Image: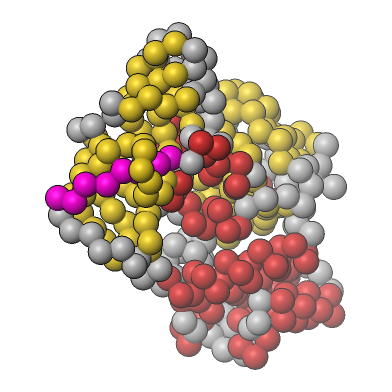
Amino acid sequence: MAEIQIKNVAKAFGSYTALHDINLTIADQEFMVLLGASGCGKTTLLRIVAGLETATTGEVWIGGRRVDHLPPKDRGIAMVFQNYAVFPHLTVFENIGFGLRMKKLPEAEVKRRVERTATLMHIEQLLGRYSGELSGGQRQRVAVARALAMEPDVILMDEPLSNLDALLRLEMRAELKGVLAESKTTAIYVTHDQVEAMSLADRISVMHQGRIVQADKPVAIYRNPAAEFVAGFIGNPPMNFLPADPRGDGKWMVAGQVIDGPTHSGALKFAIRPEDVKLGDHGLPATVRLVEPLGAHLLVTCDVGGTLFRAVLDSDLSLKLGDTLTLTPQGDRQRWFDPATTLAVA
C-alpha cells in the first residue's frame, strides 16, 4: 500500500511563503496531478514529498510511514524530471539498470526488470543504443522506464512531457496512463498544462498562490469549479463571467436580462462555459467582435453588456463583425460566484 498523506505542510523561503498549510491524501495507486501556473507551489510540494526540499512545518506519510525525516533513497520513491536526466555515456540498458546496480541487485534481476520495463515503454529494441542516438520522445521513455524499474511505491513526475512536441505528448500521455495502471504505482504528476491534467488524472489538485484551491475528479472540476480562479483557469477558452445584481426571489439581472439563480444577499458573478450557450430567441444580447473558425466549431467573441464573452457555436453559421445575437445559457450549466470570497455559491 502506498497511500500518501500530506499533513499541514508549509514552506517558507525567507520572508516568502511558497506553501500555506497543505493537506492532501492520495490513495494507493491513484494518479494525482498537481495543476497550476508557474510559481503556484506545485513543484515545491513535489520536492518536499521527494525529500529534495524540507518543509518548514508539517508531515509527509507514505504507506502509513512518516518519511519527512528520511533521505530520498529511503522513501520508496522514483522521480522523472523535465530534462530527462539520461546519461549520454551509457546505453539504454545501462541507463534503465543504473539504479538497480547501485542497489547491488543480482545481474539476473537487473536484466529481468530492465527488459520488463523496456517492453512496457516500447523501447526493447533500443536497449543497445546510446542516448545520443535517441529522439526526445525515446529519451523520455528511457527516463520513465528507469523509474519504473526500481519498482517504487510512488513515482513523482515534474512536467515530464513539456519538452516534447504536441503529437509526441499526445502519444506519451496515452502510454503513461496505461503503464502506471499496469505497474500499480501511486503517482504524483506536476504540470501547468490543463489538457495533460484532464486526460491523465484520477484526481486533480488545482494550486494557486501556494494553496490547493480544489481537489476533485477532472469532470467535477470542469463542471463544478469551487472558486472563481478554477473557473477562469480550467477550460480553453475558460468560463465567461458577467456581473449579476439581485432582483429578489432568486431572480438576477445579468446584462439587462432576468435570469433564475440562487437565493443570495448581495451581488454575484454569473459564469457559464463558452460551449454551454446556444443561439435562441431569448437570453443575453450579444454583438460579434471576432469570429475564429476552429474546424468543427466557431469560437465567437462577443460584447455582452460591455463585457467580452466567448461562445462556441456551430461552424455552419455565417457570422461577421457587428452581427447581433441572442445567446441562451443552459440552465443546468450555470455557476455563480461571490465576488467578495471568490467562492462558488451555486
| Residue in front for this viewpoint, 339 or 159 | 339
Quadrant occupied by the C terminus: top right
Residue 166's place in the image compared with 13, above or below, is below
Q: In this view, does 137 lie to the left or right of 257?
A: right
- The residue lying furthest to the left in this view is 322
Secondary structure that dominates the magenta span: strand
- Against 188, residue 140 (above or below) is below
59 vs 156: above or below: above
Q: Where is residue 191 in the image (x, y as percent from the top left)?
A: 49, 51
Q: Where is residue 162 in the image (x, y as percent from the top left)?
A: 44, 62
Residue 217 in sight:
yes
Q: Quadrant of residue 266?
A: top left
Q: In this view, does 234 lie above or below 153?
A: above
Residue 323, magenta (yes or no): yes
Q: Position of residue 252 (x, y in %)?
A: 40, 20
Left or right: residue 270 versus residue 61 is left
282 is within the stretch colored magenta: no
Q: Position of residue 55 (x, y in %)?
A: 57, 30
The residue sitting at 27% across, 47% down in the picture is: 325
* Residue drawn at 60 percent across, 47 percent down: 219
53 left or right of 28?
Answer: left
Segment colored magenta: 322-329
The residue at the point 71 percent across, 41 percent down is 26
For this rendering, which residue is in front, 54 or 339? 339
Task: Tell me what residue is drawn at x 46 percent, y 75 percent.
Answer: 167
Q: In this figure, which colouring scheme has been used for the structure? A: secondary structure
